[in-house]
Image: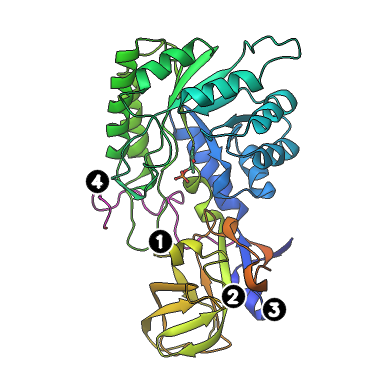
Amino acid sequence: MQHFPDARSVVRALRPDEPIILNRPHAAARAARFFVEKFPGKSLYAVKANPSPDLVQILWDNGITHYDVASIAEVRMVRSVLPGAVLCFMHPVKAPSAIREAYHQHGVRTFSLDSVEELEKIVEATRGEDGEAAQDLRLCVRLRVSSEYSELSLASKFGCDLTEAPQLLQQTRQHADWLGVCFHVGSQAMTPFAYVQALERVRAAIAEASVVIDMIDVGGGFPSVYPGMEPPPLEDFFTIIHRQFEALPIAYNAELWCEPGRALCAEYSSLIVKVEKRRGEELYINDGAYGALFDAAHVDWKFPVRALEDDLIKPEMDFSFYGPTCDDADYMQGPFPLPEDIQAGDYFEIGMLGAYGAAMKTDFNGFGAAERIIVTDEPMASLYDGSRTRPEADNVVSLR
Ligand SMILES: *Cc1c(COP(=O)(O)O)cnc(C)c1O
């Protein structure tokens, strides 16, 4: 991969006709070290946020030893890059063949589930050739919790209800060498209180089940920073989670885990795009809803933008974007502030695309190409560079 100091120098040297993904290994390394040093337990990387082998290697080099994988393709990818990593298959609905391959060929022992059908599937798929049940399963029951404090809900698809949880915990205990409870509060949780309400629900479930619990996994949801979404410091999340964890009725040596995706990789990547056409306040650009800007189009996510041309001198005004495909839905409302005099042929940079950005690119309509270049400047915003020691409010609740 080529190296440049920053986006401007890339544009000056290449004037690229296709979008370019800029990666910042130092930013991902810093995020990994932050979680390794400050989270009061083990931090898994949720691979789906950005399944790049380069990124996975950077996280490993900076202390992330456990990986939350959700498909057999993710299992294979992480195993091929990191032979020593611990892989945890945390998708609660899996194909039997995926469980079988993960367990027998890739050493996966940790699986999540949210129903008795899935428990039976795991028990069957992990039997030995002699038909003996596996004795070393580490199983996590996924509980449904509220997403009300998060920008993106994950409350409806997975997780068992509080009414079903005690029985499922008891049934799972009979097959598990080690039993955990996991949940996901939704992505981009804007206040630590999201985890308080979830852990209250965990407490209720395990009190009623009265089984020994070896691990609590508070999932992902840790925020990054975007325009209009300035979360409190992650240290506040960690302190509150630890306090709630310590008060749970669990084994004295129970472990605390988390599974950040976004928070570990949002700062890793940004994107250089070119303006192909301007129509008033609308810019037609060469990446979009089917590229790295899925969330900008589909859930109106606001990503930071900055112009890359030296001759743009006017003040900023708000723009919306059209992506390159022929689909009307390839539209990003924004608003995205850029200089008033920006025009066709100009370049700008879109930041904070390391999570659920670069990973989402498709080839739809022939527009999937994007070179990757390493840059060494700072991401457009950071939770880890010491610049945001204490934002104004401690409990910023999401602006919906
Ligand atoms: C997506 C996902 C994560 C990561 O979520 P973020 O909001 O990106 O931190 C963690 N765990 C599971 C089970 C997930 O599906």
Residue displayed at 62% across by 65% down: 21
Q: Which residue is mark 4?
A: 395
Kind of residue sitting beneath label 2 = Arg
- Asked if 89 appears above or below 53 in the picture, the reply is above
Q: Residues within 10 Å of mark 4 (few under 14, many from 20)?
A: some
* Badge 2 density bin: few <14, some 14–19, many ≥20, Cα 10 Å: some
Callout 1 environment at 10 Å: few (<14), some (14 to 19), or many (20+)?
Answer: few
Q: Are discs 2 and 4 less than 8 Å apart at CB?
A: no
Mark 4–mark 3 Cα distance, whole angstroms, equals 44 Å
Provide the residue designation for mark 1. 299
Q: Residue at x 39, y 10 (%)?
A: 211
Mark 3 vs mark 1: in front: 1
Callout in the foreground (1, 2): 1
Report the quarter where the N terminus lies.
bottom right
- Give the position of the C terminus as an image quadrant: bottom left
Q: Which residue is mark 2?
A: 8
The kind of residue tagged 4 is Asn
Q: CA distance from mark 2 to mark 4?
A: 36 Å
Question: Residue 119: horizontal and vertical position, in percent?
Answer: 53, 22
Q: Which of labels 2 and 4 is toward the front? A: 4
**Which residue position holds label 3?**
13
Q: Mark 1 or mark 2: which comes first in sequence?
A: 2
Residue 56: give x, y in percent of width and height: 64, 43
Q: Residue furthest front?
A: 117
Q: CA distance from mark 3 to mark 1?
A: 34 Å
